[in-house]
Amino acid sequence: MMEPVLPCSACPLRPLPAFKPLRPEEVMSISAAKVGQRLCSAGATVLAEGQATTRVYVLLAGWAFRFKSLEDGRRQILNFLLPGDLLGLQGELLARLPHGVEALTPVNLCAFGSDAVPSFFRDHPGIALDVTWLAAHEERLVDDAVLTVGRRTAMERVAALLVHLFKRAASVGLVERDSIPFPLTQLHIADALGLSVVHTNRVLQRLRKGGFIRLEDQRLAIGDLGAMRRVGQYWEQPAPLRPLL
Amino acid sequence: MMEPVLPCSACPLRPLPAFKPLRPEEVMSISAAKVGQRLCSAGATVLAEGQATTRVYVLLAGWAFRFKSLEDGRRQILNFLLPGDLLGLQGELLARLPHGVEALTPVNLCAFGSDAVPSFFRDHPGIALDVTWLAAHEERLVDDAVLTVGRRTAMERVAALLVHLFKRAASVGLVERDSIPFPLTQLHIADALGLSVVHTNRVLQRLRKGGFIRLEDQRLAIGDLGAMRRVGQYWEQPAPLRPLL
DNA sequence: CGGCGTCATTAACCTGTGATAACCACCATG
DNA sequence: CATGGTGGTTATCACAGGTTAATGACGCCG
């Protein structure tokens, strides 16, 4: 489903302090490459695993995640997508998309034309470099995920993930009264961390009872960020200004 | 240490069938951006974790790996680097390099000038796109690593890793008499798969006794690739032609 | 309003993998 | 030719986390 096109100059995300300001002509070039918006409802498949042709999108609103699965159904979530994130680039560059993307909440996507990426590289080196920056940044997230799943204990994994998501949500202005919206079920947490749902629940209980987090009603609050960082052995370097679109 | 510069037109890797042929003027531009070669001995740190300024390299010969560690010393290998792989791009784009790189064998690196990446984007869109392709491709490898570590059993992990490395080594012409050079110790395998060394050893014994692999004397042979794929639940899509440099 | 699916929670039980330790083979080095 | 370091192998024991199952709360829909 396509929606009327919102010009990128009026993009609600751009004014956020997390995003790098662009020169007006760059914004115009990006706007020109935009072909529409796409809405997906919660739980919908945004991009199918192994899909042959993909376009590139920017997530404007809502949460989603990238995942891969094994034939027998075991699923691993690779990372979560928040507003401002780019998706579908791997499908554009490699022949097929090697992972799926699913919406966690209703989602609004900014869709680019199929020629958008090559044309950025041809005519707008600055934007092309931004695209590559976003790819490198996402790889950093996945690198962290490997470290988490490979070497952290269950308690550390959960704590690290919650801190990570809290910071990211905060950076796109989602904090309200100390808490962020938290659309993940425990199954999502488990699938992101390589744990079973049951054990994920046990760990969450411990974090709640220890007063580290408040997680109810689809919202997450973190009592003491420093303490949670310590529990999770999680010390990410603060992300510098991030390009958008 | 810097070595005399080998012109890229004479690069021994380029003729390999795994690599996409480039137009001669592109090869020349790449050659012009090359500032020298760097040799590292086995076990040396190629790039330090958290290093502030990095240059970009292409691995010409030898094996290396990217890794991250936790403060208490737990280490996770993110992926292995084989000839033709690009390293250091994240250090160039993000402010600091979020991972370390260590040589597994003596290694020969092709070093690019600090302006190389921006200049490719400015003047050679085709090459810039190749750089981004390589970044997207590496992310795919790491995505697979998350799936492996998060959702495969120990046996599956080891089998999948061995098949993966075998295929990659084969694609750069390293097969000799059915086997490839295999410079990893069991500690490396363990650190890549989120396992302990001892358990890694147990699993390798089982694979050996089952006749699935021959692993001795720093060389690896796989008896029945199909069987190993099944053991590892590993069905990667064959990599299409890959850009070089 | 009753039925059904999703999600959270808890209990009981079990197992794959980690930890520790000891020993061996090798090989580089003084 | 003793020495120490690295890497591999095996055994024993312990536990983190998986599995299965049952229950309840809630929301959706016919």
Image (spheres, coloured by chain):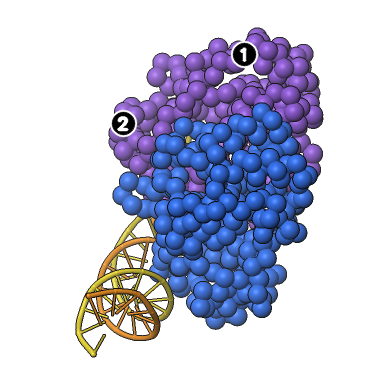
Chain colours: A purple, B blue, C orange, D yellow
Q: Is residue A43 visible?
A: no
Q: Residue B81, percent across and down?
A: 56, 55
Q: Position of residue A239 (x, y in %)?
A: 46, 28
Between tags 2 and 1, which lies in front? 1
Amino acid carrying label 1: it is Arg
Q: Where is residue B156 in the image (x, y as percent from the top left)?
A: 57, 64
Q: In this view, does A160 lie above or below A1?
A: below
Circle 2/circle 1 CB separation < 8 Å: no
Q: Is residue B51 above or below residue B220?
A: above
Q: Name the side, left or right, on which A63 lies relative to C30.
A: right
SS at circle 2: helix
Q: Position of residue B199 (x, y in %)?
A: 43, 68
3D distance between C-alphas at marks 2 and 1: 37 Å
Residue bearing mark 1? A23
Task: Identify which residue is drawn at 40% across, 40% down.
Answer: B50
Q: Which residue is drawn at 42% across and 36% down?
A: B52
Tell me if I can see residue B210 in this picture: yes
| Nearer to us in this view, B169 or C3 | B169
Reading the chain from its start, which is encountered first: label 2 or label 1?
1
Whether B128 is drawn above or below A193: the answer is: above
Question: Is residue C25 or residue D20 the one in the foreground?
Answer: C25
> Hey, what amino acid is under mark 2?
Gly
Mark 2 sits on what residue?
A: A226
Q: What element carries label 1?
A: loop
Query: Going 48% across and 56% down the picture, which residue do you hit?
Result: B39
Q: In this view, does A218 lie to the left or right of A8?
A: left
